[in-house]
């Protein structure tokens, strides 16, 4: 699977200003607001290193000394200081042209010098509509965690585009129009056609089925409540019988205690006499 080249999005300018991470050290600041780009720590490559080379690759036929120097300059070009690079260019050496890079999804493409292009040229449609649709698609396809990450990079939730149809646009802003204008627009609407006999029968059948289902649900609910009431009545009757038995035992025990109290008092009086 092809890995996407990492990039930074300006936190102030949003998607209108972005740069690839490996170019942030050269550019240093955003070309729109002047804010500094964050430092980029290059991740180690996950590609396996080649541990062998064929003899043909080690020493190809016709490999000249000036070719080695040219290759060495290309490999070390990024490490040269700007002064050294300018001196080599002034001497007639041309650096290797970088391949045209495609912008990540939802971001405008880069023009010459690493800046965002202004359009497609005279007579051609500009990119804002294409950019907005890509931005909208990127936001809708992202999860909540991805949206939070995009927000940290400077993305904002894209606002829904206005409908291009005049009728839809008027209906969307109907509440902001004067009352007289709303009445005039309503009078222009064609009256709704009366439903045919077949449509009336289908509508009545649909309502009848819905009411029948609601009635069935109410009957089932009533039956369930009645079962609970019967169980509660049986439980109440059982508890009432238990209460009566306890009251009887309580009365008997009260009489026994009263009798024992009288016997105790008589014995105490006879012993004292």
Image (cartoon, helix red, strand yellow):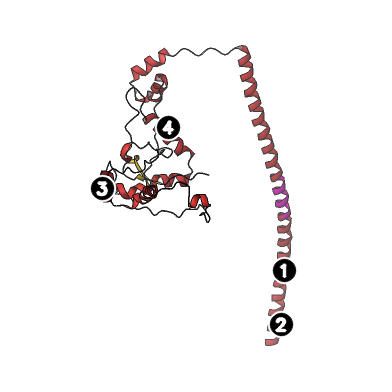
Which residue is at a point 68% across and 32% down the rendered structure image? 216
Residue stretch rendered in magenta on the structure: 230-238
Q: Earlier in the sequence, mark 1 or mark 4?
A: 4
Is 233 included in the stretch rendered in magenta?
A: yes
Would residue 127 be found to the left or right of residue 140 on screen? Answer: left
Which residue is at a point 41% across and 20% down the rendered structure image? 165
Residue at mark 1 to residue at mark 4: CA–CA distance: 90 Å
Residue 11: which quarter of the image?
A: top left
The residue under label 2 is 267
Is label 1 or label 2 in front? 1
> Which element is circle 2 on?
helix
Which residue is at a point 72% across and 75% down the rendered structure image? 260
Residue at mark 4 to residue at mark 2: CA–CA distance: 108 Å
Which residue is at a point 62% across and 12% down the rendered structure image? 197
The residue under label 4 is 133
Instruction: Depth check: give the residue in front, 16 or 40.
Output: 40
Dots 1 and 2: beta carbons under 8 Å?
Answer: no
Residue at mark 2 to residue at mark 3: CA–CA distance: 134 Å
Q: Position of residue 115 (x, y in %)?
A: 32, 39
Check residue 253 in the rendering and tell me which mark sits there, or answer none.
1
Q: Position of residue 30 (x, y in %)?
A: 29, 44
Q: Earlier in the sequence, mark 1 or mark 3?
A: 3
């Amino acid at each position: 699977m092809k890995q996407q080249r990492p990039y930074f999005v300006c936190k102030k300018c949003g998607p209108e200003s972005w740069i690839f991470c490996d170019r942030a050290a050269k550019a240093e600041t955003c070309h729109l607001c002047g804010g500094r780009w964050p430092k980029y720590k290059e991740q180690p490559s996950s590609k396996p290193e080649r541990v062998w080379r064929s003899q043909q690759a080690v020493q190809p036929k016709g490999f000249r000394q000036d070719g080695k120097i040219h290759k060495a300059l290309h490999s070390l070009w990024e490490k040269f200081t700007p002064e050294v690079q300018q001196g080599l260019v002034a001497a007639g050496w041309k650096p290797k042209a970088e391949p045209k890079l495609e912008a990540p999804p939802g971001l405008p493409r880069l023009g010459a010098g690493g800046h965002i292009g202004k359009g497609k040229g005279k007579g051609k449609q500009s990119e804002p509509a294409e950019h907005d649709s890509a931005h909208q698609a990127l936001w809708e396809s992202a999860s909540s965690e991805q949206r939070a990450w995009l927000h940290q990079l400077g993305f904002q939730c894209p606002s829904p585009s206005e409908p291009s149809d005049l009728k839809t646009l008027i209906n969307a802003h109907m509440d902001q129009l004067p009352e007289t204008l709303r009445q005039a627009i309503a009078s222009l609407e064609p009256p709704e056609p009366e439903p045919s006999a077949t449509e009336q029968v289908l509508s009545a059948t649909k309502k009848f089925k819905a009411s029948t289902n609601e009635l069935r649900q109410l009957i089932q609910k009533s039956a369930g409540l009645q079962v609970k009431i019967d169980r509660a009545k049986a439980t109440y009757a059982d508890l009432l019988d238990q209460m009566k038995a306890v009251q009887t035992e309580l009365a008997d025990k009260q009489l026994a205690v009263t009798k024992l109290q009288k016997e105790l008092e008589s014995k105490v009086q006879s012993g004292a006499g």
